[in-house]
């Protein structure tokens, strides 16, 4: 996997075989937010980062590219 949050988020989503709309519903955000995160145009809040980590069962350090 790549090291940046946008790349890791997209790869995790694709590995789980879900679209941006489904992930947006799971995280209670708009689809456009998922797209912005995946393009690196904005970053999630800490509470959303925690929700992403829980949803994909990975650590926040992993999402941030601190660990492999």
Image (cartoon, grey):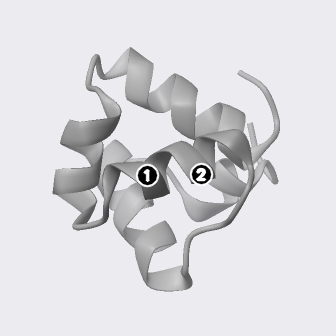
Q: Is residue 3 above or below residue 30?
A: above
Could you say which is closer to the camera, residue 47 or residue 59?
47
Number of marks present in the image shown? 2
Q: Label 2: few (<14), some or many (≥20) within 10 Å?
A: some
The answer to whether 68 is drawn above or below residue 24 in the figure is above
For this view, does 29 lie left or right of residue 53?
A: left
The kind of secondary structure element at disc 1 is helix
48 vs 54, nearest the viewer: 48
Q: In this view, does 42 lie above or below 13?
A: below
Q: Where is the C terminus found, in terms of image quarters?
A: top right
Rendered-image quadrant of the N terminus: top right
Labelled pair 2, 1 in contact (Cβ < 8 Å): yes
10 Å crowding of disc 1: few (<14), some (14-19), many (20+):
few
- Residue 38 in which image quadrant: top right
Q: Residue 6: x and y, percent?
A: 68, 42
Q: Name the residue under label 2.
A: 36
The quarter of the displayed image where residue 61 is located = bottom right
- Check disc 1 and report the residue beneath it: 32
Kind of element beneath mark 2 = helix
Q: Which residue is drawn at 17% across and 54% down?
A: 25
In this view, the residue in front, 51 or 58, is 51
The image position of residue 58, as x and y in percent, is 47, 48
Q: Residue at x 36, y 44 (%)?
A: 56
The residue under the point 40% across, 17% down is 15
Residue 28 screen position, x and y as percent: 22, 67
Give the number of the disc on residue 60: none
- Left or right: where 65 falls relative to 51: right
Q: Measuring 36% from the left and 47% from the top, which residue is drawn there?
A: 57
């Amino acid at each position: 996997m790549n090291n940046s949050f946008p790349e890791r988020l997209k790869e995790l989503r694709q590995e789980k075989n879900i679209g941006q709309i489904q992930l947006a519903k799971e995280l209670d955000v708009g689809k456009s937010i998922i797209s912005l995160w995946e393009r690196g145009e904005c970053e999630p809040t800490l509470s959303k980062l925690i929700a992403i980590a829980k949803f994909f069962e990975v650590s926040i350090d992993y999402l941030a590219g601190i660990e492999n």
